[in-house]
Image: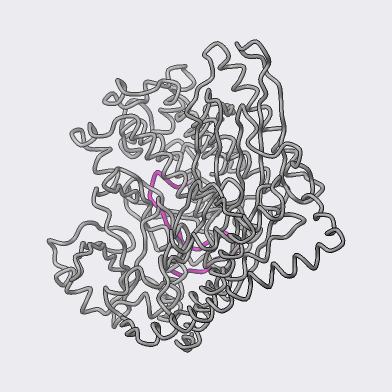
Amino acid sequence: MNEPCPKMTSFKFLIFLSSLFVISLLSLASGNEAAPTYKLHFCSGWPGTAFTDNSTFQSNLDLVLSSLSSNATPVTGFSNASAGEVYWLFLCRGDVNTTVCQDCVAYAAKEILQRCPFQKGAIIWYDECLLRYTNVSIFSTINYGPGLPLPNPQSIQEAERDSFIGLVDSTLDSLANLASNSVTGKKFATKEVEFNSSLAAPQKLYSLVQCTPDLSVSDCYKCLRVAIVNQSSCCDGRQGGRVLLPSCNIRYEVYPFYNVTAASPAFPPPPPPLPPGGSKMSSLKIVAIVIPIAVISVVLFFIAYSFLRRRPKKKHYTSSEENVGVEITTIESLQFDLDIIEAATDKFSYDNKIGEGGFGAVYKGIFSNGQQIAVKRLSGRHGQGAAEFKNEVVLIAKLNHRNLVKLLGFCDEGKEKLLVYEYVPNKSLDYFLFNPVNRRQLNWSIHYKIIGGIARGILYLHEDSRIRIIHRDLKVSNILLDDSMNPKISDFGLARIFVVDQTQGNTSKIVGTNGYMPPEYVIHVRYSVKSDVFSFGVLMLEIISGKKNSHFYQSELAEDLLSYAWKQWRSGTPLELLDPTVRHSCSRNEVVRCIQMGLLCVQEDPTNRPTMVTIVLMLNSHSVTLPLPKQPAFLHPSGAKPNKPVDLQSDQSISPSVNEASFTEIYPR
């Protein structure tokens, strides 16, 4: 893409600065000096890390932010649009008037650049509004993160705690239904409910829920339900709490935090016309204010323009480690020279080899700037040409989630096809889980954090990323741990980089690891998102037990881990499955719920397995009732047999998987 003329970009930027200056002075002149109440912001929570100076993205973003102060729609307090690759929206709280909404959005447009300079994704929340922009489309799409629960530090009296929690839950549930089905389209609702307290007079509970109006009825309700579950985790027993998500938010307090009289389906009507003579007086005041402001703006414009013309141009890098994290929208910005990778890995020396899998060997490397990387040297069994390979890598590199290993770039020279990842220092989960010494570093709370992180990463791949990915090789060795023991799923995009014949979720080859693949995949070579759910269930049971599924094959306890877990569940002794090294640190109820969830995930019929959305809800809230699991799929040796020979090797990845870019149906019917 051709970069814009530097002079033109600078000119647009100066216009933007002048506009902000004028808006600020006009606000002061009109007496609107109070800034909105800042709550939270996040930078780069979406694909892309930063934009460069004088880039097309900067030019488009400047135009967007300079115009936002005039876009506060008086009917809904919501607007969204795009300019080039900049997608933006704002949402004002449903009870605030047009003036407050405009002022909040204008203030946010100025603040968001100060808090997130040169970031391609940013969101900022105030009490009165939120403003968000990204480099990917966010319209009519649920985003559960980034976000944050904010509890009120004050607690409810212990004697009233249970009844108060029940009242909060029922009130928020009713508001979620009311807002998502709003006939006005605002998707906003409030409610005041009296409750008895130890005080002489009854108190009131004030509650508010809101979605971005572009969401469908079902998506709005789904988002609010996730927020309510998160609220239960953080704020039960508190006098107030709120959850801020990009697509929705909820809040409750024991005091009115919104305008009760204005919390109605429409914004207040415009003010009445001025009395006779008022128009003349108002015009004189406006002229007296605007002319000095215009003169000052012109002077500032020329001063800034002269300064920008004298600035030296920044140097741009290509095909080197300097390019990491700068731009990931083009092939060139992701491509590394082979000599750089060879230098970083000491020409793929054996001492730098840190792993081996079905897709190839993995080497640790260090760039000249000190950044550590992991390089996967792909095996030669793929069938893609260079163009398809590069396009797939660009697509995968735009995925971004804290529980996925970040793909930084690639190299495609001669016979070498290399993928460059961020380096994750604490090795893979099996290094800790299946080692009797290392496993003592993992108490139950770390076990639970790892389970939750893996679930959120898979949910992102299935639902929230720009492309839906079925991992198809989830296993403990593909779960890496960072320095804080947070899990990161690796190899999540390799299924797209290899090509075999396939039609709507059927494939002529099997990819996966023995013990993690569901029966419908092994027998009928059919896969779906529920295939990953099955693998996740096996992972959960391995994490809980500290034992490999494959270790049960020759055991007297059971034929495999799934049948052993089912046996203990049916016998009423599920805690017998738990790794003895964590029994002293665990919550018995939490462990039993996790075992039940694991068994729900490995049920034989894919339609009976929960989705990852449901699993994340179950993990985040102990108040969610879990159904009883049915008998899991037993694949060894008395279980189902494949209809045709399949070369399954224990703990070995099998043939490279398929490119799923053309799937038209990947959910089980």
The residue located at (57%, 54%) in the rendering is 33
Q: Is residue 560 visible?
A: no
Q: Left of 643 or right of it: where is 197?
A: right
Query: In front here: 397 or 30?
Result: 30
Residue farthest to the right?
A: 276
Where are the magenta residues, as a range? Answer: 498-517
Q: Position of residue 404 (x, y in %)?
A: 40, 54
The residue located at (84%, 64%) in the rendering is 277
Query: In front here: 61 or 549?
Result: 61
Q: Is residue 508 magenta?
A: yes
Magenta part mainly helix, strand or loop?
A: loop
Q: Left of 408 or right of it: where is 596?
A: right
The residue located at (25%, 40%) in the rendering is 432
The residue located at (28%, 74%) in the rendering is 322
Query: In front here: 96 or 152?
Result: 96
How was this image coloured?
one colour
Query: In front here: 597 or 33?
Result: 33
Q: Is residue 232 magenta?
A: no
Q: Position of residue 218 (x, y in %)?
A: 70, 47
Q: Left of 309 or right of it: where is 280?
A: right
Q: Left of 87 or right of it: where is 181?
A: right
Image vertical order of residue 141 relative to residue 2, above or below: above
Q: Quadrant of residue 367?
A: bottom left
Q: Position of residue 214 (x, y in %)?
A: 69, 56
Q: Quadrant of residue 375?
A: bottom left
Q: Is residue 467 visible?
A: yes
Q: Position of residue 48 (x, y in %)?
A: 44, 66
Image vertical order of residue 567 relative to residue 326, above or below: above
Number of callouts? 0
